[in-house]
Image (tube, grey):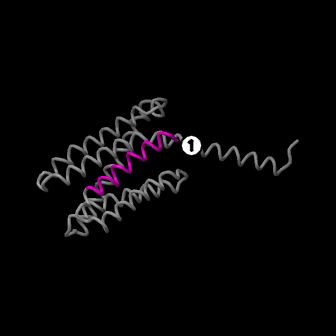
Amino acid sequence: MIDRSEAAEALRSVEQVRLRTSAAGAYSAASPHLLLSGVIWLVGFAATGLARPAQWPSVWIPLTILGVLGSFVITLRSPRAARADPAKRIRQAARGLWISAALIVFIESTFLLFRPTELTSYFVFPTLLMGLIYAVIGAFGMHRFIWIGAGIYGITIAGLLLAPAAILFCVAGAGGGGLVLGGVWLRKA
């Protein structure tokens, strides 16, 4: 027979295994989304840095549509969704669309409210917001997201302070590169 402290320790061990297993599953599900988002972010900001301002919408509109639709498809085809009934799969994928729409509306509303006079704000703010979101997700037991968010945030601020003339390429590397590296790292979880 085991005593009370041994039973409590066994229960703590079981809970730790459950939490690690849950986090690994969440990392696995998030990895393809980060990879897709990272590539789109990297291509979008690098192309923005090379294009004239009048061409920026022709860069970002198709990339945004591709990203939202790609994320929808990734969610529908995920192993976790495959085990769910079709209605639940659609709801999960639709949730991603709503989150994307809410973020886009929030960012655009913030720009409308504060009306930045420098273009740098339009590039840096979404990247800092993304770093914050990943750091907050990490606070809910998925600690690798803290590092992803901190890396994105830190590289963006360093680029802003040390290379403001190259901020588009810093943001491409911080956001896009950070998400791609994060996606690869989460895949190995």
| Left or right for 44, reference 72 | left
Task: Say which of 37 and 147 sits in front.
Answer: 147
Q: Which residue is mark 1?
A: 22
Image quadrant assignment for residue 37? top left
Task: Say which of 170 and 138 sits in front.
Answer: 170
| Left or right for 178, reference 45 | right
Determine if the magenta segment contains residue 178.
yes
Task: Say which of 63 and 113 sits in front.
Answer: 63
Image quadrant assignment for residue 134? bottom left
Name which residue lies at 41% across and 60% down: 132
Name which residue lies at 25% across and 46% down: 43
Quarter that holds the N terminus? top right
Up/down of 67 relative to 49, above or below? above
- The spot of residue 163 in percent (x, y) is 28, 64
Determine if the magenta segment contains residue 149.
no
The magenta-colored residue range is 169-189
| Left or right for 23, reference 174 | right
- The spot of residue 109 in percent (x, y) is 27, 62
Q: For the stretch drawn in magenta, what is the main secondary structure?
A: helix
- The spot of residue 91 in percent (x, y) is 40, 39
* One can see residue 95 in this view: no
Q: How many labels, in total?
A: 1
Q: Residue furthest right?
A: 1
Tell me the kind of residue under disc 1: Ser
